[in-house]
Image: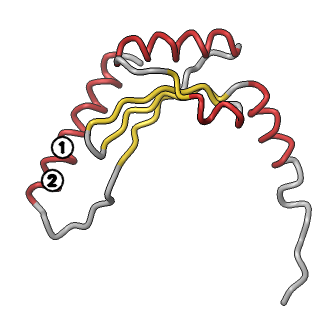
Amino acid sequence: MTHNHRSALINGLLDLAAFLEAHPQVPVSSSVTVHHFPDQNSDADQRAEIDQIAALVGSEIDYEDSPYGHYATSRLFGPVEYRAVAVLATARARHDAENSYRGCIQPDAT
């Protein structure tokens, strides 16, 4: 992430918080998650980045998503979550296979 991109995200979050504080009539959800996905292609490189992030934020690897082919870590700030997720090759291949028929099957009109 470039410094400008990072600064823009942080400023946007701060602006959103200030806006919501100033406008209590605007509804909000009960939680929010900010996701980060590694840019690397290999599973090993993606896992290494998630491991590094886990060390930086003081969290463990979340193995709950591992059966789905995700390698993740997160840190909670009350109802706000920072979550870093590597979508591994098997999960990407499964997603591509499941979506390969998208638009090819037309259901009967009811």
59, 22: nearer the viewer: 59
| Residue ID at (86%, 86%) | 109
Instruction: Kindly identify the residue that appears in the image at 75 percent across and 33 percent down.
Output: 92
Q: Residue 108 in the image: x percent, y percent? A: 90, 82
Label drawn at residue 37: none
Which of the 4 image quadrants contains residue 66?
Answer: top right
- In contact (CB < 8 Å): disc 1 and disc 2: yes
| Rendering coords of residue 38 (x, y %) | 55, 21
Neighbour tally class for label 2: few under 14, some 14-19, many 20 plus, Cα within 10 Å: few
Residue type at mark 2 is Phe
How far is mark 1 from mark 2, CA to CA?
Answer: 6 Å
Q: Local crowd at mark 1 within 10 Å, few (<14), some, or many (≥20)?
A: few
Q: Is residue 43 above or below residue 104?
A: above
Residue 47 to residue 92: above or below: above
Q: How many marks?
A: 2
Tell me the kind of residue under disc 1. Asp
| Rendered image quadrant of residue 27 | bottom left
Q: Quadrant of the C terminus?
A: bottom right
Q: Which mark is residue 19?
A: 2
Return the residue at label 1: 15
With 101 as the anchor, is 32 left or right in this view?
left
User: In this view, which residue lies farthest toward the left?
Assistant: 22
The secondary element bearing badge 1 is classed as: helix
Question: Residue 57, image x and y in percent?
Answer: 34, 18
Residue at horizontal 59 percent and vertical 35 percent from the top:
64
Question: Circle 2 sits in a helix, a strand or a loop, which is it?
Answer: helix
Establish if 14 lies above or below 24.
above
Q: What is the x, y in percent for residue 101? A: 89, 53
Q: Is residue 28 above or below residue 88?
A: below
